[in-house]
Image (tube, rainbow, N blue to C red):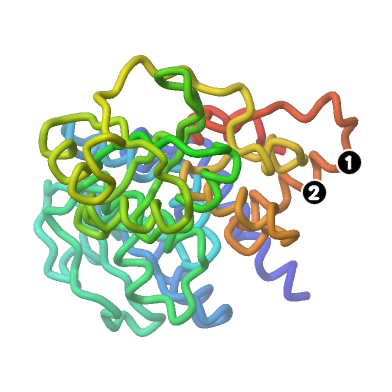
Amino acid sequence: MKNLLMLPLILCVQSFFAQAPTELGEVAWLRDIAMAEQQAEQTGKPIFLLFQEVPGCSTCQRYGQEVLSHPLIVEAIENCFVPLAIFNNKQGADRKVLNYFKEPSWNNPVVRIIDSKRNNLMPRLSGNYTKLGVVQSMIHVLEDAPDYLKILEKEFLAEAIGTETTSLSMYCFWSGELKLGAIEGVVATEPGFMHGREIVQVTYNPKTVKYEDLLSQAKQSSCADQAFVHDEQQALQAKQVLGSQKVRNKANFRLDKDRKYYLSKTHYRAVPMTPLQAVHANRLIANGKSPDAILSDQQVAFAKKIARQAKSEWINRIGADIRAAWSVMKF
């Protein structure tokens, strides 16, 4: 009986989603606040309420294309919330909701997260049209946010601040990826060759870990035989930590074919992941653990589907853009 009662709601979502405009991205939105409140009451989930101009300006379109189309953001909105879209440039039911929340018409995207009684659960998100803004808002509301959202926050925060890159040589870049990837603030690692040596190219958030601290931790882990510096400031700091004889200017970087070595030897290599997810997955697998805890439900489902296929069909998607890779994983 419960499934029969939910059928009109499901059909409503599917019918609307088939015609979803660019401004709404790839989220399957409800368009009726009463339905959203009913579903929130039944499931205990908050309502992710988007006020959006449809059709909208370039800001509104970019929000749909970039923020609301990132596969992990889409999954979080659909799984952890009740998604509700209200058009801020329409009359009728949309205008009534707009007036209730005192939202301006013909406006750029605004996000509110509310409960089934329309109480605000977070400060209104306005003027922030970034993936980071949406992810931080969701984490703020969720008592137990999934690990993949927390990983996304670290990646988007590093992207917003501006990442830095350094190149470190060591006895084995497969082990180097594991040890350097464990340093808080590192958001991506790539194994390869430079000056004829095995190196790991490390991308990190300089606000989370300073370059000299990164070098010190790398040295303690035997992952800094030499530092191939990317600028003069790195050169000065590297000489202080490692000594002048272990510092050289960077050269051409040749990427190794076995990125994330331990991950690449499993069926998880075919699961689309973000760079930091891949770093964590590689370390977990190397330690004999499943990476499922840092993956989303859909990523875990992808992994199970892939595991049933022949090994020759496990396409290596390590390093691939998650959105492009995700589009061919739908099932």
Left or right, residue 222 beside residue 287: left
Residue 19 position in % (x across, y down): 47, 35
User: In whole angstroms, how far apart are the C-alphas of marks 2 and 1?
Assistant: 7 Å
Kindly identify the residue that appears in the image at 45 percent across and 69 percent down. Answer: 36
Which residue corresponds to mark 1? Answer: 308
Which numbered tag is attached to residue 304? Answer: 2
State whether residue 152 appears in this view: yes
Along the line of sight, the residue nearer the viewer: 292 or 101? 292
**Quadrant housing the C terminus:** top right
Kindly identify the residue that appears in the image at 62 percent across and 48 percent down. Answer: 282
Kindly identify the residue that appears in the image at 19 percent across and 69 percent down. Answer: 124
Left or right, residue 191 beside residue 208: right
Kind of element beneath mark 1 = loop
Amino acid on which the number 2 mark rests in the picture? Lys
Residue 203 position in % (x across, y down): 34, 41
Q: Note whether 96 is above or below 233 in the view shown.
A: below
Left or right, residue 285 beside residue 178: right
Amino acid on which the number 1 mark rests in the picture? Arg
Res 311 → quadrant: top right
Crowding near pointer 1: few (<14 within 10 Å), some, many (20+)?
Answer: few
Kind of element beneath mark 2 = helix
